[in-house]
Amino acid sequence: MKIIDIKSALIGYNLTLRVVTDKGVDGYAQVEENRSFLNLKPVVEFYKNMLIGCDPTDVESCMRRIRRVGAFKPWGKVVSTIEMALWDIAGKEAGVPVYKLLGGKVRDKVRVYCSMYATDKLPYPKAATPEERAENILALNEMAGFTIVKSPVAFHNMDFARQADELGFAYDSYLPDPPARHMDNANGSMLTEKGLNYLINYVATIKERVGDKVGIAFDCGPGLYPNDAYKFAKAVEPYNVMWLEDLITGDYTPYNMAKSYRDITIHTTTNIHTGEQIYLRQNYKELIETEAVNVVGPDPADVGGIAELKWIAEYANLHGIHMAPHGIFDGVFGMAALMQVTATMPNNFIAFEFPEAHPAWWYDIVDGIPNDYFKDGHVKVWDKPGIGVEFIIPKAEKYLLPEDKDFFL
Ligand SMILES: [Mg+2]
């Protein structure tokens, strides 16, 4: 079997790839994130030219061609997405779900966690106060059975970031444009005592309301000064949060500061988490070998794919580090890919971040996902060959943009 083309189309918010073969077996996957402030189509073309003529079922052989010319976003996004589409082909060709090719499943359902941005059906869709966040967390548990919910705090919380100047939470200003508020800003502004107290109180208020009914993780940054991050982690120890995520680096930054993380992690009982934008296992090496964090969260759509994620999970497990993969914007194909790989992970697996497809019509244009696949905060491991999702082409093609009309042809 040979790859003859790699096509891409912006369907809804996600750029979707189709790896086309000479045997008529297609592989599909979605790029993480994006309604695209970036046009990634030229990047797809770049890698396509290195893969034409290769056998997609030799996934690793294909990856050796393109992995070395990948990097942190946006390059790694496309390399990772191609990897998942190759596994889709390999599974379909072998007639087995991808988890069989990754070592086989060790669980029949996988726990997922919910990030609070995921839905607008909550009691407080624009929750600004910690009290409203707490009510939303309880609602997510009651409505969908989520056992873990992640809430934004500190500079990851736009309300905090926007008001940092006005209310005197930090000593330096942040850009007024929220999407740019802390990009590329590790080792950011020092918090004022008022800002630090606000953060501690924010977590305390939520945890006091929710109690131990739901595990709560907090997505924090990046951009906290390491000593502020340490004081914050120390102060919230009594609340047993699931983890504090990306306090210093790890989101928006194309590098990670393992030593700074380690200084915090070894001095607090609060679990520290990072890694959602890291590309490749090699860039996890220092974080894992120095036990710089308690939990790592690679996104298969950024780290280099699902086999890459599996290797990192195994290596983390050897060092007593837990695994909670990122995935909020991975779409319906990404959700299925996360299910396939996490079904095979060792016991350090906690949960993956549950991606909802946006817009909701995505669920009408694909087939394969069982109706009862999501229950009580878990995704059932289903058995379709490949990644486990197929397009219903007559329905899907209605959503193609004019420039992508030949996507399924
Ligand atoms: Mg995050």
Image (spheres, rainbow, N blue to C red):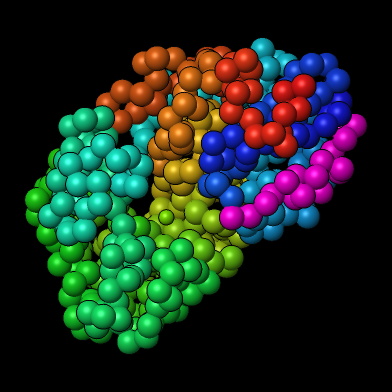
Relative to 187, say whether 209 is above or below. above
- Residue 57 visible in rendering: no
Q: Determine which quarter of the picture holds residue 155.
A: bottom left
Q: Point out residue 29 in the picture as x, y percentages from the top left corner.
A: 63, 33
Quadrant in which the N terminus appears: top right
Taking the spot 32% from the left edge, 40% from the top edge, the residue there is: 119
Taking the spot 66% from the left edge, 21% from the top edge, the residue there is: 91
Taking the spot 40% from the left edge, 74% from the top edge, the residue there is: 176
Q: Determine which quarter of the picture holds residue 54.
A: top right
Relative to 169, say whether 217 is above or below. above
What main secondary structure does the magenta stretch of the protein show?
helix
Taking the spot 44% from the left edge, 14% from the top edge, the residue there is: 370
Q: Point out residue 378 in the picture as x, y percentages from the top left corner.
A: 34, 28
Taking the magenta stretch, the answer to whether it contains residue 197 is: no
Quadrant in which the C terminus appears: top right
Q: Residue furthest bottom?
A: 171
Q: Residue furthest front?
A: 402
In the rendered structure, the answer to whether residue 170 lies left or right of residue 75 reads left
Residue closest to the eye, 111 or 51: 51
In the rendered structure, the answer to whether residue 89 lies left or right of residue 108 reads right
In the rendered structure, the answer to whether residue 31 lies left or right of residue 364 reads right
Relative to 333, say whether 311 is above or below. below
- Residue 204 visible in rendering: yes
In the rendered structure, the answer to whether residue 199 lies left or right of residue 34 reads left
Q: Quadrant of ligand 1?
A: bottom left
Q: Which residues are magenta?
A: 37-54
Residue closest to the eye, 116 or 176: 176
Taking the magenta stretch, the answer to whether it contains residue 44 is: yes
Q: Point out residue 69 in the picture as x, y percentages from the top left corner.
A: 78, 55
Q: Residue furthest left?
A: 209
Residue closest to the eye, 330 or 296: 330
